[in-house]
Amino acid sequence: MDKRHFLQISAVLVGTAFFSRYINWSSETMAASQSEFAVTKPENEWKSILTPEQFQVLRKHGTERAHTSPLDKNYAPGTYVCAGCGQALFTSETKFDSGTGWPSFFKPIEGAIATTTDRSFFMTRVEVHCSNCGGHLGHVFNDGPKPTGLRYCMNGVSLQFTPA
């Protein structure tokens, strides 16, 4: 092996080791810990009760396209619940227009969510899950309004709205 070939292989190995932390392992991590949630179902049962888009987002950590959810511009009084299990997650009093194209809230209902670290797409974000079934809801960011300064950016397809 010549020096040039050795350096090329070394660069690939070092780059792979460095960037491996940014590969999205969250689906596997969450799948391994599904037994921690009160509501657990086999994958085929989730598929039978969710639409294909809901299944992709809630169970496979997908993201809906921005500006496609009717819940983004819904400001009626009520409660936003998990589309997978029906647990109450956010109230309409905490909803605001973030301009991102996804329903956004500055505060969840106490105990309604769980979070994990998401290292996909070469960045680190805080992923938000339903604390009852583990369904992927979206992400939380530190650029929200007062009083919390947080923006819970949720996939509308992972939520259902219950009017007050």
Image (cartoon, rainbow, N blue to C red):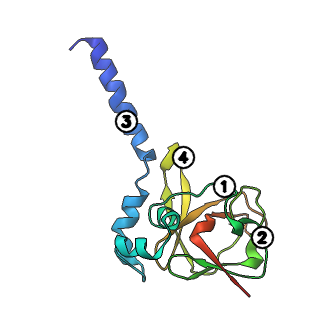
Q: Is residue 105 visible?
A: no
Mark 4 or mark 3: name the one nearer the start of the chain: 3
Q: Residue furthest bottom?
A: 164
- State which quadrant residue 100 falls in: bottom right
Label of residue 123 in the image: 4
Q: Amino acid at mark 1?
A: Ala
- Indicate left or right for 143 with 46 as reference: right
Q: CA distance from mark 2 to mark 4?
A: 26 Å
Tell me the residue that label 2 is attached to.
Answer: 147
The correct choice, above or below, for 3 with respect to 15 in the image is: above
At numbered mark 4, what does the secondary structure look like: helix, strand or loop?
loop
Q: Amino acid at mark 4?
A: Met
Mark 2 or mark 4: name the one nearer the start of the chain: 4
At numbered mark 1, what does the secondary structure look like: helix, strand or loop?
loop
Residue for point 38% across, 62% down: 29
Mark 1 or mark 4: name the one nearer the start of the chain: 1
Residue 146 in the image, given as x and y percentages of width and height: 79, 67
Residue 128 in the image, given as x and y percentages of width and height: 55, 66
The quarter in which the N terminus is drawn is top left
Tell me the residue that label 3 is attached to.
Answer: 16
Q: Nearer the viewer, mark 2 or mark 1?
A: 1
Q: Amino acid at mark 3?
A: Thr
Q: Is residue 78 visible?
A: yes
At numbered mark 3, what does the secondary structure look like: helix, strand or loop?
helix
Q: Amino acid at mark 2?
A: Pro
Q: Which one is in front, 23 or 53?
A: 53
Mark 2 or mark 1: name the one nearer the start of the chain: 1
Q: Nearer the viewer, mark 1 or mark 4?
A: 1
At numbered mark 2, what does the secondary structure look like: helix, strand or loop?
loop
Q: Nearer the viewer, mark 1 or mark 3?
A: 1
